[in-house]
């Protein structure tokens, strides 16, 4: 008797479809819940089945992506996709515990061991109202660097240095003084105005024709040239 009951139960369960593999085709990513066309076992066509993903994460799988379908209540027409995988593009050889986001184009973000986050891409764009970085040390290695600040840009630091030339297209203001040394000295083009102090040098001061240290007048005593400055 129990054997017959068990057999009938198994026969009833056999008619309830279990989870199975599919190949995903086109996916409608504009819907509130994505719907996809898929091919199941024996070239079975599944149309408009829902693609469920975790809250806070979404992806638009490429055609040819593998998936696992769960027929709700064992009914194929009520199937949902609960997992997807594409072996051709999945990042391989991750260390235990590592996590990654990736695309078929090779862009990726990997949360690596040692608390390292590594991103590879062609363009990295951040759109935000405020951007704040708190760190002990920062380094940027690039060929060119461009910053566009329509209002102002400021640095709060005891020292700001550059290893090579510093060029300003506008006014340079030194409210705390200015010190220049080394190299070939300093050069100015245009007028130089100095007020509110004196000009001190332990060298010579020269114009286009006259040296202050070597300056002499031709109308000295008995018409002879005068001596140089004392």
Image (cartoon, rainbow, N blue to C red):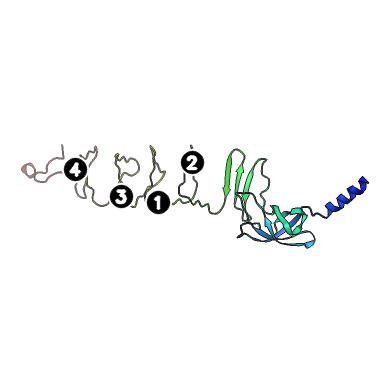
What is the CA distance from the residue labelled 1 to the residue labelled 3?
17 Å
Reading the image, the residue beneath label 1 is: 149
Bin the neighbour count of mark 2 within 10 Å (Cα to Cα): few under 14, some 14-19, many 20 and up.
few
Which of the two discs, 4 and 3, labels the residue nearer the N terminus?
A: 3
Tag 2 secondary structure: loop
What is the CA distance from the residue labelled 3 to the residue labelled 2?
29 Å
**Near-viewer residue (225 or 190):** 190
Which of the two discs, 4 and 1, labels the residue nearer the N terminus?
A: 1
Residue 176: image location, x then y, percent: 30, 39
Tag 4 secondary structure: loop
* Left or right: 212 in relation to 170: left
Depth check, mark 4 against mark 3: the one in front is 3
**Near-viewer residue (212 or 90):** 90
What is the CA distance from the residue labelled 4 to the residue labelled 1?
46 Å
Bin the neighbour count of mark 3 within 10 Å (Cα to Cα): few under 14, some 14-19, many 20 and up.
few
- Viewport quadrant of the C terminus: top left
Bin the neighbour count of mark 1 within 10 Å (Cα to Cα): few under 14, some 14-19, many 20 and up.
few
* Left or right: 7 in relation to 123: right
Reading the image, the residue beneath label 2 is: 138
**Near-viewer residue (165 or 83):** 83
Depth check, mark 1 against mark 3: the one in front is 1
Q: Residue at x 77, y 54 (%)?
A: 74
Tag 1 secondary structure: loop
Q: Residue at x 48, y 41 (%)?
A: 138
What is the CA distance from the residue labelled 4 to the residue labelled 3?
31 Å
Which of the two discs, 2 and 1, labels the residue nearer the N terminus?
A: 2
Depth check, mark 2 against mark 4: the one in front is 2
């Amino acid at each position: 008797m129990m054997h017959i009951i068990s057999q009938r139960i198994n026969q009833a369960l056999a008619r309830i479809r279990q989870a199975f593999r599919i190949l995903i085709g086109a996916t409608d990513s504009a819907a509130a819940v994505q719907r996809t066309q898929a091919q199941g076992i024996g070239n079975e066509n599944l149309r408009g089945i829902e693609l469920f993903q975790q809250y806070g994460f979404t992806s638009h799988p490429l055609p040819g992506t593998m998936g696992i379908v769960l027929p709700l209540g064992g009914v194929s027409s009520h199937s949902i996709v609960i997992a997807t995988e594409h072996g051709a593009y999945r990042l391989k050889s991750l260390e235990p515990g590592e996590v990654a986001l990736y695309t078929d184009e090779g862009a990726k973000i990997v949360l690596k061991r040692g608390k390292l986050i590594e991103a590879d891409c062609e363009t990295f764009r951040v759109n935000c109202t405020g951007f704040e970085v708190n760190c002990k040390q920062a380094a940027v290695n690039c060929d060119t660097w461009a910053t566009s600040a329509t209002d102002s840009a400021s640095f709060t630091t005891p020292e700001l240095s550059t290893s090579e030339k510093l060029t300003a297209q506008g006014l340079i203001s030194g409210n705390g003084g200015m010190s220049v040394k080394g190299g070939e000295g300093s050069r100015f083009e245009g007028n130089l105005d100095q007020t509110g102090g004196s000009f001190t040098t332990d060298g010579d001061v020269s114009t286009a024709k006259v040296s202050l240290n070597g300056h002499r007048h031709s109308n000295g005593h008995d018409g002879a040239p005068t001596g140089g400055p004392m």
